[in-house]
Image (tube, rainbow, N blue to C red):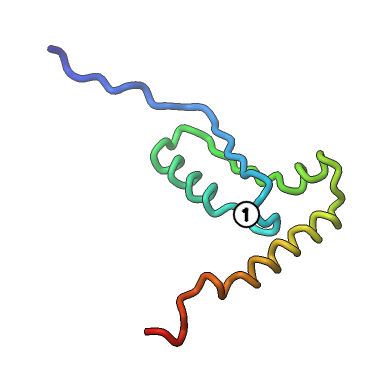
Amino acid sequence: MGPETQPPPLSGAIALVSPPWPLYTRPSIQLGTLKAFVRSRFPNIGVRSHHLYLQVAEAIGLAAGQVELVYGDIDAKRKAAFYSHQRPLLVP
């Protein structure tokens, strides 16, 4: 048998798009991690992350003020539920 041949290096581009339900004021850490991984493993591939939260909201007819109210409500509920997900403080 002849020497093993390596497949040609991959090239091209990838667009990573975050879905619209995370908090719109924070970029997706998952996309950042995936982007770094792809860049480290496939340096010839371009990678761009897109966080289209406000653009999606606008496309479905929500104003920026409405989006802020909705996300503010979600954040308040998340903060209120924080303690219900913690270990008991008085029980060993």
Residue drawn at 46 percent across, 41 percent down: 39
Residue drawn at 75 percent across, 63 percent down: 73
Where's residue 75, x and y in %?
69, 65
Number of callouts in the render?
1
Res 44 → quadrant: top left
Where's residue 32, x and y in %?
53, 50
| Up-down relation of residue 77 to residue 20 (above or below) | below
Is label 1 in a helix, a strand or a loop?
loop
Q: Which one is in front, 84 or 69?
A: 84
Residue drawn at 36 percent across, 22 percent down: 8
Horizontally, residue 56 falls left or right of residue 6, namely: right
**Residue positioned most to the bottom:** 90
Q: Mark 1 belongs to which amino acid? A: Pro
Q: Which one is in front, 17 or 47?
A: 17
Horizontally, residue 49 falls left or right of residue 54, namely: left
How many C-alpha atoms fall within 10 Å of the one at disc 1: few (<14), some, or many (≥20)?
Answer: some
**Residue positioned most to the front:** 91
Q: Which one is in front, 46 or 71?
A: 71
Look at the image and tell me in which quarter the C terminus lies.
Answer: bottom left
Horizontally, residue 63 falls left or right of residue 70, namely: right
Look at the image and tell me in which quarter the N terminus lies.
Answer: top left
Residue drawn at 64 percent across, 66 percent down: 78
| Up-down relation of residue 68 to residue 41 (above or below) | below
| Up-down relation of residue 30 to residue 7 (above or below) | below
**Residue positioned most to the top:** 1
- The residue carrying mark 1 is 27
Where's residue 24, x and y in %?
70, 55
Res 77 → quadrant: bottom right
Horizontally, residue 68 falls left or right of residue 21, namely: right
Where's residue 65, x and y in %?
86, 57
